[in-house]
Amino acid sequence: MRVVFEDAEVTRERFMIRAAGSFAEGVHLVSGPVGSGKTTLALAATGLRTPKKGKIYMEGIGTFTLSQQFPEYHITGTTLNEEIASWGLKPDHILERTGFNGQGSRDPFSLARGELKRLHLACVLSGNWDLLVLDEPFSGLDCREKKRIAGEIATLKAGIVIIFTHEQTVFPRVDRLWELQEGFLRDLGPVPGSFPDWRGAPPLLRMLLEKGIVPRNLANEDLLEAVCRM
């Protein structure tokens, strides 16, 4: 299974992103500042935006989905029960898991954005996907929820997971690092060997690298272990 960007140029109004590379099985982190084109590439990776030049195609992928930054975009049900069922899931299980037990008749839009995001991600992460694209999955969540979601992502059975984010604090364990800078998608390579080339690396990682300490990965426990080596 893989998603291939073959010398692709994807445009958004007057902004252009150039991308070349192959996303194979594993967890990929695509980092970039706000406005760098992460959402545009996330849409392109799932076929929702066509490149102006080049090709973007999938190989060996049967099931795939995109989780967008704002959970409101995904709502199709008038109640929590209907929304959960629309993902082919049993409402009672998801409601209990997300802290909404007994509230299945609520209107999804009566939830705060963070609550709705929690419900949406519970549905998305419960699916069986060959390709799962997550656009800013940590947006709108508090620190506790970010850590919980990061832990769940690390245990997914999906073939390919691509995370587009500008997050600087909480990460799951990832296999490969990519970076969007100045309109180009750069394949930095496998983790942890790619850390020194990460221009937008979070402050804690930069501090560790400056001291010659390379963490095994980006999860909190990996960074904590590296800090203990200082």
Image (spheres, helix red, strand yellow):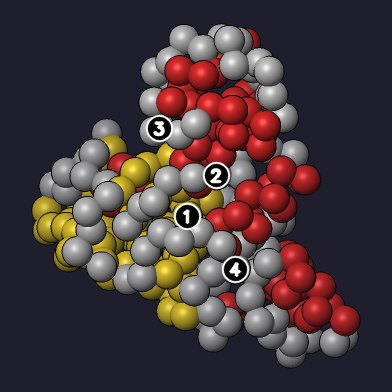
**Mark 1 surroundings within 10 Å by alpha-carbon count, few (fewer than 14), some (14 through 19), many (20 or more):** many
Q: Which residue bears the numbered disc 3?
A: 87
Q: Which residue bears the numbered disc 1?
A: 163
Q: Earlier in the sequence, mark 4 or mark 2?
A: 2
Q: Are marks 4 and 3 in contact (CB under 8 Å)?
A: no
Residue kind at label 2, given as amino acid type: Pro
User: Under tag 1, what secondary structure?
Assistant: strand
Q: Earlier in the sequence, mark 4 or mark 3?
A: 3
Q: Residue at x 43, y 79 (%)?
A: 189
**Mark 4 surroundings within 10 Å by alpha-carbon count, few (fewer than 14), some (14 through 19), many (20 or more):** many
**Residue 46 appears at what percent x and percent y?**
27, 47
Dot label at residue 137: 2
Residue closest to the eye, 159 or 72: 159
Residue 74 is at least partly visible in this image: no
Residue kind at label 3, given as amino acid type: Trp
Q: Earlier in the sequence, mark 1 or mark 3?
A: 3
Q: Residue at x 19, y 64 (%)?
A: 60
The quadrant in which residue 109 appears is top right
User: Under tag 3, what secondary structure?
Assistant: loop
Q: Are marks 1 and 2 in contact (CB under 8 Å)?
A: yes
Q: Which residue bears the numbered disc 4?
A: 173
Horizontally, residue 226 falls left or right of residue 151, namely right
User: Under tag 4, what secondary structure?
Assistant: loop
Work out how far the residue at label 2 is from the one at label 3, CA to CA, in angstroms: 18 Å
Q: Earlier in the sequence, mark 2 or mark 3?
A: 3
User: Under tag 2, what secondary structure?
Assistant: loop
Residue kind at label 1, given as amino acid type: Ile
Nearer to us: label 2 or label 3: 3
Work out how far the residue at label 1 is from the one at label 3, CA to CA, in angstroms: 20 Å
**Residue 123 appears at what percent x and percent y?**
50, 37
- Give the answer, above or below, for where 176 lies relative to 104: below
